[in-house]
Image (cartoon, rainbow, N blue to C red):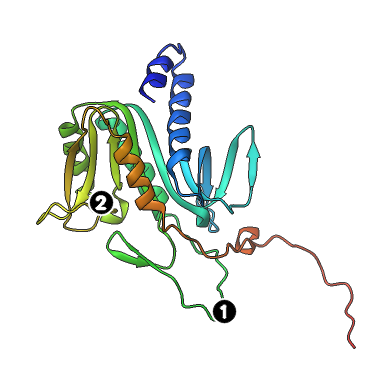
Amino acid sequence: MRADFEQSRNFRHSGEAGTSREVLVQEFLSGYLPAHVEAVHNAEVISANGDISPQCDIVLIDRGTPPFTTLNGYRIIPNECVYGMIEVKTKLDGNQLRDACKKISKMRRMPKTAYRPIPGTIPRSTTAYGDTHRFFPTSGMIVAFESLELETIGSHLMEWCRTCNPNEWPDSVWVIGKGHLQWGDPRNGTLFRSPVAGASLFQIDAIPDQDILLSLALHLNIHFSDAWMNPLDLLPYSDDTLLGRIANQWTL
């Protein structure tokens, strides 16, 4: 991945360079995500109430997601099928961090309501961000190829998080060649999968020979191995669209 990143520096157009780096991360993710989770590049997420996400670098979705629209590789995805999102940054600084945090916050606040109940089944739930959800809440991570000092990024992240609730905070921040930021228990240093109120932000420096890739691969597997979704109900997405008229009726 580092070698491919260095090669992408040769792109003269910054847009092409940025896209190539997003694809690098997507390909890495695809090799280590659980089989039922798919990494999609260049997507937009919609919800049944009409909310629309910002354009997302990488969206992690259930492999059973219906293809709403796929044009030239660009996909529109119902929010109920989304497990997570990853913002990819070439060089992470304070402004880039805040931009990514705002996108994650907006995505996590989008409602997931269009599911069909399964009769006779005990409802499933997931506990995350200090609450219990009847769906798998959208995870949000940031992956960067370069950044300011990790300590500086951590300070910027804490500054942003002080103005928001834990259910809007990013789950983790990863910088190749440096390390990552992750929430944990302030009493014993146990790392959490997702942030909660009262959690501390820990800076974990990478071991030089391993970089962050092994840690990131393990984290992805832990984070999404139990990702799940109830059957998707597409009727709410049709809104008030007339689907047909009853013209005749027969009875025996």
Quadrant including the N terminus: top left
Q: Are marks 1 and 2 in contact (CB under 8 Å)?
A: no
Is disc 2 placed on a helix, strand or loop?
Answer: loop
Q: Label for residue 119?
A: 1
The answer to which quarter of the image holds residue 239 is bottom right
Does residue 58 appear to the left or right of 179 in the view shown?
right
Q: What residue occupies the far front of the structure in this picture?
A: 209
* Residue 54 seen in the figure: no
Taking depth in this image into account, of 18 and 218 the one nearest to the observer is 218
Which element carries disc 1, helix, strand or loop?
Answer: loop
Q: Residues within 10 Å of mark 1 (few under 14, many from 20)?
A: few
User: In the rendered structure, which disc, 1 or 2, sits on the residue that comes first in sequence?
Assistant: 1
41 w.r.t. 146: above or below = below
Q: Position of residue 249 (x, y in %)?
A: 88, 79
**Marks 1/2: CA–CA distance:** 37 Å
Mark 1 vs mark 2: in front? 1
Measuring from the top left, give residue 56's x and y in whole percent. Answer: 46, 39
Asked if 67 appears above or below 2 in the picture, the reply is: below
The residue sitting at the left extreme is: 187
In the image, taking residue 89 as reference, residue 20 lies left or right, namely: right
Asked whether residue 26 appears in the rendered view, the answer is yes
Residue type beneath disc 1: Pro
* Image-based side of 64 in relation to 174, left or right: right
Residue occupied by mark 2? 164
Residue ID at (50%, 52%): 51
Residue drawn 42% across the image and 44% down it:
85
Q: Position of residue 45 (x, y in %)?
A: 51, 47
How many other residues sit within 10 Å of disc 2, few (<14), some (14-19) or many (≥20)? few
Q: Quadrant of the C terminus?
A: bottom right
Viewer-proximal residue among 53 and 71: 71
